[in-house]
Amino acid sequence: MKNLYRSTTDRKLSGVLGGLSDYLGMDASLLRILFVIVGVFTAFLPLAIIYVAWIFLVPEESEVS
């Protein structure tokens, strides 16, 4: 069973998208590009709120193991 976590190795800011890409089984760079594209069309506010909430709600990779 896969666990959802924030990555400690594949991170740019806090590891949110790195962990999500590992959970979804897709490339982290592609997910980051999609995140920026969706952010441009939604004025970044909804994604910023989700991103910050994810930082506080999802544990880091070292805490899950």
Image (tube, helix red, strand yellow):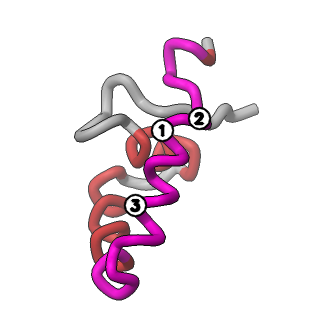
Start-end of magenta stretch: 39-63
Q: Amino acid at mark 3?
A: Ala
CB atoms of marks 2 and 1 within 8 Å: yes
> Which residue is pictured at 68% across the width and 34% down the height?
2
Q: Is residue 17 left or right of residue 2?
A: left
User: Quick one: label 3 or label 2, which is nearer the N terminus?
Assistant: 3
Q: Amino acid at mark 1?
A: Ile
Q: Is residue 27 left or right of residue 36?
A: right
> Which residue is pictured at 40% across the width and 71% down the height?
45
Residue 64's quadrant in the figure? top right
Q: Nearer the viewer, residue 55 or 16?
A: 55
Residue 39 tag number? none
Q: Nearer the viewer, residue 25 or 53?
A: 53
Marks 3/2: CA distance? 15 Å
Q: Which residue is mark 1?
A: 55
CB atoms of marks 3 and 1 within 8 Å: no
In the rendered image of this protein, does residue 30 appear above or below residue 19?
Answer: below
Q: Secondary structure at mark 1?
A: helix
Q: Nearer the viewer, residue 36 or 21?
A: 36
Q: Which residue is mark 3?
A: 48
Q: Which residue is mark 2?
A: 58
> Which residue is pictured at 53% across the width and 45% down the height?
54
